[in-house]
Image: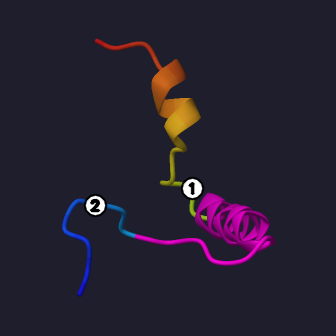
Amino acid sequence: MADTADTRLRLLVGDDAPAQVVAALDSRRRNYARDPRFVSAAEAAAEPTH
């Protein structure tokens, strides 16, 4: 039975799991960056609001 107090969506298993997640997310960001419509969170935060 699952612990209902544990609200994590993902559980990292293994010593190298965090590095694998970083690599996967970096790859996804590079893929998205190929689309000129994509704006990263850092770029969006740096844009002045109107």
**Residue 19 location (% of width, % of height):** 78, 65
Q: Nearer the viewer, residue 35 or 46?
A: 46
- Secondary structure, mark 2, is loop
Callout 2 touching callout 1 (CB < 8 Å): no
Q: How are the colours assigned in the image?
A: rainbow
**Residue 44 location (% of width, % of height):** 47, 31
Label 2 belongs to which residue?
7
The residue located at (64%, 64%) in the rendering is 25
- Decide: few, some or many residues near mark 2? Use Cα within 10 Å; few <14, some 14-19, many ≥20: few
Quarter of the image that includes the C terminus:
top left
Q: Which residues are magenta?
A: 10-34
Tell me the CA gap for discs 2 and 1.
35 Å
- Secondary structure, mark 1, is loop
Q: Quadrant of residue 43?
A: top right
- Decide: few, some or many residues near mark 1? Use Cα within 10 Å; few <14, some 14-19, many ≥20: few
Q: Mark 2 vs mark 1: which is more N-terminal? A: 2
Question: Label 2 sits on what residue type?
Answer: Thr
Question: Label 1 sits on what residue type?
Answer: Pro
Quarter of the image that includes the N terminus:
bottom left
The residue located at (19%, 68%) in the rendering is 4
| Residue 25 painted magenta | yes
The residue located at (64%, 58%) in the rendering is 33
Q: Which mark is residue 36?
A: 1
**Residue 41 location (% of width, % of height):** 50, 39
Q: Is residue 44 above or below residue 11?
A: above
Q: In the drawing, does residue 48 fall left or right of residue 28?
A: left
| Residue 30 painted magenta | yes
Q: Quadrant of residue 24?
A: bottom right
